[in-house]
Image: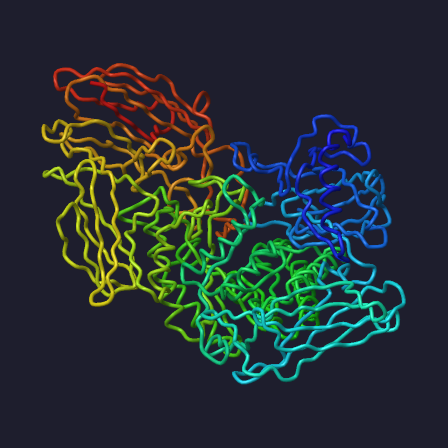
Amino acid sequence: MNNKKRWFTILLSVLFAFSTFGQEKTTFSINSNWDFFKGNVTYPEVLNQKNWEKVQIPHSWNKTDVNDDTPGYYRGAGWYTKTVNIPKTWENRDVYLLFEGANQTTEVFVNGKKAGSHIGGYTAFTINITPFVKFGDEKSNEITVKVDNSYQADIPPLTADFTFFGGLYRDVFISAVAKTHFEIDQYGGKGVFITTPLVTNDKATVKIKGTISKGTEQEVIVTATIVDQNTKIAKQQQKLKLNTNNVFEIDFQDIKNPKLWSTDTPNLYQVITTITDKKTGKILDEISNSLGFRWFNFDADNGFFLNGKSLKLIGASRHQDFKGMANTVSNEIAINDVHLLKKMGGNFLRVAHYPQDPVVLEACDRLGILASVEIPIVNAITESEAFSENCKYMQREMIRQNFNHPSVIIWAYMNEILLRPPFGNDKDRREIYFKSVAKLAQEIEDITRSEDPTRYTMIPNHGSFELYNRVGLTKIPMLVGWNLYQGWYGGKLDGFAAYLDMHHKELPNKPLLITEYGADADIRLHSNNPIRFDKSVEYAIDYHQVYLKAMLDRPFVAAGIAWNLADFSSEERAETDPSINNKGLLTIDRKPKDSYLFYQANLLTKPFLKIGLSGRNIVGGVANANDILEQQLKVYSNQKSISLTVNGKKLDMQSTVMGCANFNVPFKQGENTLIATAGDGDVFIQDQLSITANLVPEQLASKTLPFDEINVSVGDNRYFLSEEDKQLWLPDQEYKVGSWGYIGGKVFQLADTARQSFGSNIAISGTLLDPVYQTQRVGITGYNFDVPDGKYNLTLHFAELLSTEEQKTLAYNLSDKTANKDQFAERLFDVIINGKPAIERLGNKNELKSGQAISYTIPIIVTNQSGIKINFTPILGETILNGIQLKKCY
């Protein structure tokens, strides 16, 4: 293994020598040229394994297996190894490895010996490797790291609606520090903690506390300097005799006229803290932290206040993955996410459900985004001492690692912890479980308030008000967060406002935040008649309009935090976009959805205007008698009224309601130019878009609009645009003479409509057209196309949507477990086209497998104006059809 790295280690030793000249502290990344092996083997036997591959850090072994057709993904051990040269000049220093994140347990070996370990996949940690290293340019050191993302009952999260990507997925650093340095061994913190006990418009006080490693017995001077850009505004010192007192505390009592930190003007100071050897005058360690002067409070009646001014917190939560990258996102992507939130007009980020890369909160500090951070206790706990200790340790890690960010105002824990409590058949045992949850919550609460009495605490709960209130989880934290989905997972949209009012009545003294709300929006799906759970962009807009208005209308709602900023991976989800939770305001590769534009229109103060065709460059449908397609279109703007010109013709001006103006747009076949304008006087803004319309004639034998092709998602009322081949699938329709459509049957619907009111909830293997295969007509008798004579290719699509296997109850499924269940039934049928057998004895005991796509393309020659008549003849059970395509050859 070592020989493969010889040239890299030579280069690394040169970098070491250059970077350490004249310095007591050196830190840089060692992300390059690691070797990786996946497998559950032991150390040191793993070093004898073959088939190691060269990788760069950040790295995850789950980049591809999460999104394939096979359920599940690899959860086990992965090994990383490399050699480094550590120069002789470091011999009198302490050498550390710093890991920003590794999921979820980590063991570190140096030169054949175990140097340390860490539990938890989302907090940073340091490993002191000084006792194990060999110093000298000619001496290489072998570093081997085992990371394991296996399920472990004593480590949160146990279950969650996101993917537990394994790997060494954040940056790794090596650092050499003087023997006397700020304490970095405790909980991965920086050893320096800053508070502002008093802040007003006129003055502020600053308190700086910290701990110094024991080192050798010596006298040191700790100096703290507050800097405003390049100007030093205050400086204080404290002398310490180490091994007698290693804790320092420096107070600045009178900072005049501080520049306040706010969401509009995020003024940042820097606090530079140094340790100097009193005898030699040599600087032993130095650290810089951001400082923001602000004060804030939550009020149960009037919401949130920053620097004495009322501020409605509106924003989103963030998961850390990105399309094709798992969690191995670059610093630039993470920072850009915060910029995207700011560009949306948001002022709050819920860092959920776990601490994230340090650059996220650094960006919040710079951009003026307030934040909450939480540890990953999600859905359930294990009633063990080990689980409790791991949770409490993570909470301390989270607080100490993120303590000095002025953007952070809330420490949270226990997301939806009573979502699916165990022991449902044993009431007494379940009550014991509830007491265990409350006990752990109180212990974490006490730790949090002890570690940081300057910030608020919060538990985000799902909508079971009575249960959380009875167990005590609405009483323990300082704030209550509610994750509410009325009108999505169940209930109706108007139930959201009623829930807000109920909370304020029942808990009049408890500040309220809406920590989650959202509706899936697959940008490929659109509907003129959106309904719950159809995943259409249009339903999501209806949903967000209702929710935002309810929150803005109620001063006691301190925050509205959309779920989620961007789509994210959830391997167990099996819906229109398998393994993806589509509630994001952005796609997983950060393209804006209409819902993102909606918030820009409602939150931005600078003039904003955008045509609502996010992600689409093709529309289509059935033309009217004038060969025109009329479709609804939204334009998003914070202006009062909007003008829209289509192909040079100006439509009637429309007023905006909650940032939306609705137009009925006439599209012609081919290219269409849309120009939206708004404003008058000093304000004039415009947005222009070119879009292709693929029209199907109302009468297929039309002379003015010749028929070319049609793709129909059978049993569906949505438009679906396939990203890969740019094919537009149309909603189904009943057959009309001269046109096309189905004959007979009914739309497929799950028995449990409380959970999902539209289509199937299973992923379809062997296709990228999941939305097409997830809907169907059951008991269909025919499908007709009254096309003119010619040669055509007809493609029929089938998938069995029921199964004999028990379907897994997913964590986010909020419907009753005892709800109606779908009954699998054998089916067998023939397909006859224009009187001739085409597909014989197709059934779910042969080719028609559950959850698998199957299609048949059949060439057809139409003569004598006979059109195409497809008959479905049942032999056993009911016939089905999921999709149908017809393309004219000549």
Question: Horizontal and vertical percent for residue 217?
Answer: 90, 67
Question: Horizontal and vertical percent for residue 627?
Answer: 13, 37
For residue 207, above or below residue 631:
below
Toward the viewer: 236 or 45?
236
Question: Horizontal and vertical percent for residue 880?
Answer: 35, 29
Q: What colouring does the structure picture have?
A: rainbow
Residue in the picture at 10% in, 39% down: 626
Looking at the rendered image, the quarter that the N terminus falls into is: top right
Toward the viewer: 476 or 801?
476
Residue in the picture at 69% in, 62% down: 436
The number of callouts visible is 0
Residue 258 placement, left or right of 711: right
Residue 294 placement, left or right of 16: left
Residue in the picture at 48% in, 40% down: 574
For residue 279, above or below residue 133:
below
Question: Horizontal and vertical percent for residue 213?
Answer: 82, 64
Looking at the rendered image, the quarter that the C terminus falls into is: top left
For residue 145, above or below residue 465:
above
For residue 104, above or below residue 685:
above
Residue in the picture at 76% in, 45% down: 107
